[in-house]
Each structure stands twice: as structure tokens, then as C-alpha cells.
Amino acid sequence: MNYPKMDTATCNHLFELARPYLTVRSNQEHTEICFLFAGELQENLGGRKEIIFPAIILHDVGWSAVPEELHLQAFGPKVTDQSLNRIHEIEGAKIAAMLLQKISLSTAAREEICRIIENHDSGKNPRTLEEKIVKDADKLFRFSPRGFPIDVQRFNVDAGIYWHKLNEFKEQWFFTALGKKIAARELQKVGQQVFK
């Protein structure tokens, strides 16, 4: 895949390191889509690539530590146990810390990346532009023509109803104006398929 203005070799290496932890929940595809959105956001808003890109590549590695049969209790429209979601953040930060030792980054950068991963779903007040970009890129997956059908299938929801829900949520979910704008753009593409 083409990586947006980043050291391709480092990104490829980090994706390879992460791959064994992304085998559940369609996380490999999820991460690749989120990475592209992170690239678009970073290119237009700025922010430190050495924080944004490793954080988005590793943000969901922690789902590998949660039994797969429990995943749908932790996220989506039928959440029953949000503590499981928190587990994936905490375990994800631990896994990320281990994997980040294998690429060239400062200790401060590693710590910041792990902090972002540990709060990427539960954190309500992102501290930095980099954290906002990671959080927005993660959410944009579900608005994309590739991500939307994955969620419709796994959540077993009506596509039209889900589209309308996302259309409402886009006003509250994003931390950047550009994230909201991209969500609207992507949702329009999805709508052309859902309502044709």
C-alpha cells in the first residue's frame, strides 16, 4: 500500500510487527483504512508523523488480548460491557510499547504514542493535534465505503438505519473540522450505494 509522506520502510516494518495482533475483528483492513485517513488529516492539518502513524498502526493491537467472542459486547450499537473496550486500550498500549522498541524512536515519542493508544476510545479530551488526528482517523473507518459494510455485517444492523445514525453522530464524534468534513464526504459515497 502507498503510505502518505512517511518513511515507507518504517511503516511497512511496523505493520509487519503488528500483523499478528491484527488478525481479529477485521483489524488489518480497519488499520489500513484508518492509516489512509490519518495521512489525509496529517497532510492537511500538520502534526508529527512520528507520533500519528505509529499510533494509528498500533491503536487496535490490544483486541488480540480480548477473547473474540466478547468483542461485540465492547463496542458498536449493542454495547453491554465497556470495560472490555478499556482492556483493549490498556493491553494495546503494552503491546505497542514492546513493538515500538523495534523501530527508531525517542523514548518520549514512544511514551506519547502509548498514551494515545491507551486513550484512543475512552479519552474524551485529546491533549494534542496528533491525538485528535488518531481519534478522528479511527472513527472515519465506519464512514468509509470499505468500513461501512463491515460494520453493518458484524453489528447485524439495517444499512439505511445505520447510515442515518452515522449521519447524526458525525456532528458529535469528531475533534477536527476536517474529520467531520471527510466523514460527510465518505458518508455521501456510502449513501449512493445504500439508497440506490
Image (tube, grey):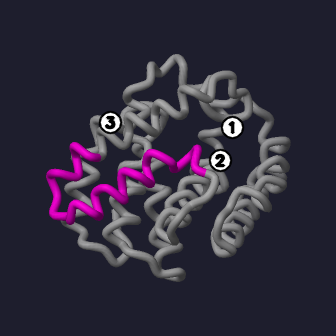
Quarter residue 182 falls in: bottom right
Q: Are marks 1 and 2 in contact (CB under 8 Å)?
A: yes
Residue 74 in picture, x, y percent from top left: 60, 28
Dot 3 or dot 2: first in sequence order is 3
Q: Secondary structure at mark 2?
A: helix
Can the viewer see residue 125 in this picture? Answer: yes
Judging by the rendered image, the residue that carries numbered circle 1 is 152
Nearer to me, 165 or 152: 165
Q: Is residue 79 above or below residue 103?
A: above
Give the CA distance from mark 1 to mark 2.
6 Å
Residue at (65% x, 65% y) in the render = 175
Residues shaded magenta: 97-123
List the residue tagged with mark 2.
148
Q: Are marks 3 and 1 in contact (CB under 8 Å)?
A: no
Calculate the distance from the C-alpha at mark 3 to the C-alpha at mark 1.
23 Å
Q: Report helix, strand or loop for mark 1.
A: helix
| Residue under the image location 38 percent in, 34 percent down | 91
